Image (cartoon, rainbow, N blue to C red):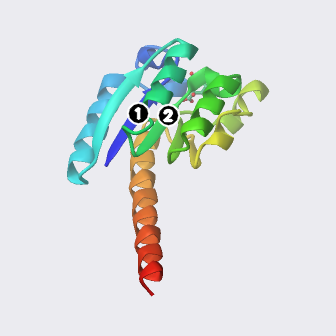
Amino acid sequence: MKIIVIQGPNLNMLGVREQHIYGAMSLEQIHKQMSDAAKQSNVELEFFQSNLEGELVDKIQECLGVADGIIINPAAYAHTSIAIADALRAINLPTVEVHISNLYRREEFRQKSVTASASTGIISGFGPFGYHLALMSMTQIFNEIKAMKEAEAKQAKK
Ligand code: DQA
C-alpha cells in the first residue's frame, strides 16, 4: 500500500514557527517518525511539501493510479482552497486531513475547512501525533476496503 503525505504552506517551518501552537518538531522529524511506523505495517510512504497551491493540486492529481491513499495537511489552504478540494474529489482516493492544532479552539476563520468535506476523515488538535493517528486511520480504511471487496467477491460467486 502506498500513501502520499502532502504538506501545505509554511509546514516546512515547523519547529521554528509558533512553537506554542505547532510544537518543536520539524517536518523532517515528523516524517521520520511516520516512516519508522510505516515500516512496521507494510506501507510505503512518499512525502511532498509545497507553499504553492497549484503545486499541491498537481501533486494530488498525480496520486491517481499511483497511490492508495493520501494524508494531507493543506495548512492555510484548508480554509480557502476550492481548487485543492476539487482535486481531492476528482481523484477520489481515501484521504485523511490532518491539522496539528485544534482548528475549533482557534480564530473563527480557521474553524472552517473547505477541503475537509473532500476527505474521508479529519484529525485536528493532537499535535504532530495527529500524523501517526492518520497513518493508523489509513491502515484501518485499507482493511475495511479489503474486507468489503472480499465480501463482494464472495457474493458474486454465489
Ligand atoms: C494548520 C492550521 C492552519 O490554520 C494553519 O494555517 C496552518 C497549520 C495545522 O496544522 O494546525 O498552517 O493546518
Q: Quadrant of residue 140?
A: bottom left
Residue drawn where x is 57% and y is 16% of the image = 53
Q: The disc labelled 2 sits on which kind of residue? A: Ile
Q: Is residue 108 visible?
A: yes
The answer to whether residue 38 is above or below residue 23 is below
**Residue 145 x/y as whole percent:** 45, 62
Q: Is residue 129 visible?
A: no
The answer to whether residue 79 is above or below residue 34 is above
Label 2 with label 1: CB-CB less than 8 Å? yes
Q: Between disc 2 and disc 1, whose residue precedes?
A: 1
Residue drawn where x is 47% and y is 70% of the image = 148
Regarding ligand 1, which quadrant of the image does it lie in?
top right
Residue drawn where x is 71% and y is 28% of the image = 110
- Residue of label 1: 5
Image mark for residue 72 = 2
**Residue 30 x/y as whole percent:** 34, 31
